[in-house]
Amino acid sequence: MKKLRSHSTELGLLILVVALVPSLMVFFLANRIFRDSITEQQHQELVALANSTRDQIEGLVTTRINDANSLSLLPEWSRILAHGEPGDGGDEPFFRFLDSYLMEKGYDDLMLIGPDGRVRFSMTYPELAGFHVADRSRLGTEIAESVDAANTLLQTEVSNFSWFPPAEASSAFITSPVLEDGLIAGNVVLKVRETLLLELAANNAFLGRTGEILTLAREGGGLAFTTPPRFSPHLAVGEPGHEALSEAVKQALSGDHSGGFLADARGHEVLAEWRYIPALNWALLVKIDTAEMYEPVDAFFRASGLVLLLALLLTFALVWAAHRLVTRPLELLTAEARGAEEGSLPGGLQVRGRHEVRELSQAFNLLLARLRSHRQELEARVDERTAELSAALDAAEAASRAKSEFLAVMSHELRTPLNGVIGFTEILTKTSLTPAQRQYVRNANVSGHNLLRIIDDILDLSKIEAGMLELDTERTDMVELIQNSMDVVKLAAARKDLELLLRVDPALPRYAVVDPVRLTQILCNLLGNAVKFTETGEVELRVEYRPGSILFSVRDTGIGITGEQKEKLFLAFTQADSSTTRRYGGTGLGLTISQRLAQRMGSRIEMESEPGRGSHFFFELAVG
């Protein structure tokens, strides 16, 4: 038997090697061609995006420069500069024109600078009148340099974006000289919002998960970002640029339009294209991680490798099957014996072969018959015990349902007298009471409200368990729902001096079909828990829109939860531990009810947490 098996194995391996060599050559060649194709395609897309972004920024800046040039030629400036300050009644039509012009063109402010460098007036920040442009505490760092450059070169100049104190935001300035008889009489300064260029520089729609657009400029002998990077938003505009990209940026600033592979600050290999923006004297760099770029190649590699492996295995199997017929009787007997060993218990082994093989088959059949009889007896006993357990389980479930149904229908009877007690205590607070009596009444009112919340939680859980809770979906204003949920915990967060953050995806639709009451109940519970268990730091609600669903996540910097506590967190009447209940209060029903409601909505609340580092609860809700 061993010799026959050895012959089959040797022949199969020989044919496998003969088929393997050309197959592997084709496999690696196809993957190499596909990789090169992906590289060229991504390179062309980066080139197109870099050129398009550069042209859009150039066009935007050129338009703003033309606006400043046109405004500087208005004759009214000479009269205003000659008077030393804006006139009274005669200048009103002109200022109405300036107001409408700023609104139409999207500028934040227009300032008039006198020949002495002092602000004559500001349309948006009148308090700046009289201050010199060199006063950095009032006007920042860029206006003075922009005015000096415009007066030196007698042309319109565009500043870099920098911090502008009155607006408490980053801004750029377009400065144009006002000439009278060939002499500089003053300057017109237009203030531009950072968002105008951020919308262009942050257009990562075609760059997947890892791509980004960077804009940099020379500053203080080095390089600095002029718009915040996508993956380093904590870096403010003006902070030093990535050293790994500095060589490419320097090439761009020297006018070299090129591209290639390089490593970014994260140590990731990227494919990049860089361009020069003459109007701003900026460098534009567009890049994407090669890991993401080659994901289709990796997927093709795995798929084609699997196909190749299956083909080789099939070839080997066919050769093996063709040459093992001589050992078939023993192999079949062995396979059937293994089946009996694993518990399949076939009706009996087919008696085949001659001599010892035939006797062995008959012996196996006798053994299998005895095993079948023993198994049937065991199965009968198991069926009997299973029926008894099933009946007991049905009785227990019926009792539980009866309890839940009773509590669910007792809602009105429990709430009505308690609401009466709360109402009368509120009336008592408006009567003539001594301070001590008033405090007693307030304590009774607070206790009544706490008891009402506990009863509401118990009744909600009972309705859910009894199957009597129905969702009432309707077209809902999601922005209002989210804000209302935040308002519920705003006062509690303020009392603990916690920072309450709300981040809503701009792509979130205004309206969605949900159950507003139950969704608000879930959000308020998660936010309330976050505020309750957080002593310092912040609580954040983040809402992200995904096609067909909305992801809600609540993150805090509170006490956190251990791995052992996570396992029982969503159980009814359960908190992290007994000390948590004593310190923070509560029934432990909130998360249980929220989880059941989320499940009724087709979702599930998940959580991540570390003790002492806070918790993160999130769920994704399908919406219509």
Image (cartoon, grey):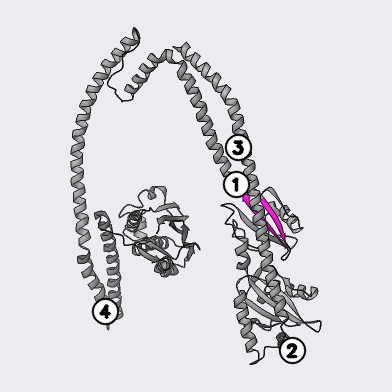
- Amino acid on which disc 1 is placed: Met
Q: Earlier in the sequence, mark 4 or mark 1?
A: 1
Which SS does the magenta portion mostly show?
strand
Q: Tag 2, which secondary structure?
A: helix
Q: Can residue 549 be seen in this view?
A: yes
Question: Residue at point 81% right, 84% down?
Answer: 181
**How far apart in space, not on screen, are marks 1 and 2 (Cα)?**
62 Å
**4 and 1 marks in contact (CB < 8 Å):** no
To which residue does mark 4 refer? 427
- Mark 2 or 3: in front is 3
- Amino acid on which disc 4 is placed: Ile
Q: How crowded is mark 4: few (under 14 residues within 10 Å), some or many (20 or more)?
A: few
Question: Residue at point 19% right, 58% down?
Answer: 406
Q: Where does the image place residue 239, in percent across and percent down from the top left?
A: 66, 61
Q: Is residue 332 left or right of residue 147?
A: left
Q: Which of marks 1 and 2 is nearer the N terminus?
A: 2
To which residue does mark 1 refer? 293
**How far apart in space, not on screen, are marks 1 and 3 (Cα)?**
14 Å
**How far apart in space, not on screen, are marks 2 and 3 (Cα)?**
75 Å
Magenta span includes 420:
no
- Amino acid on which disc 2 is placed: Ala
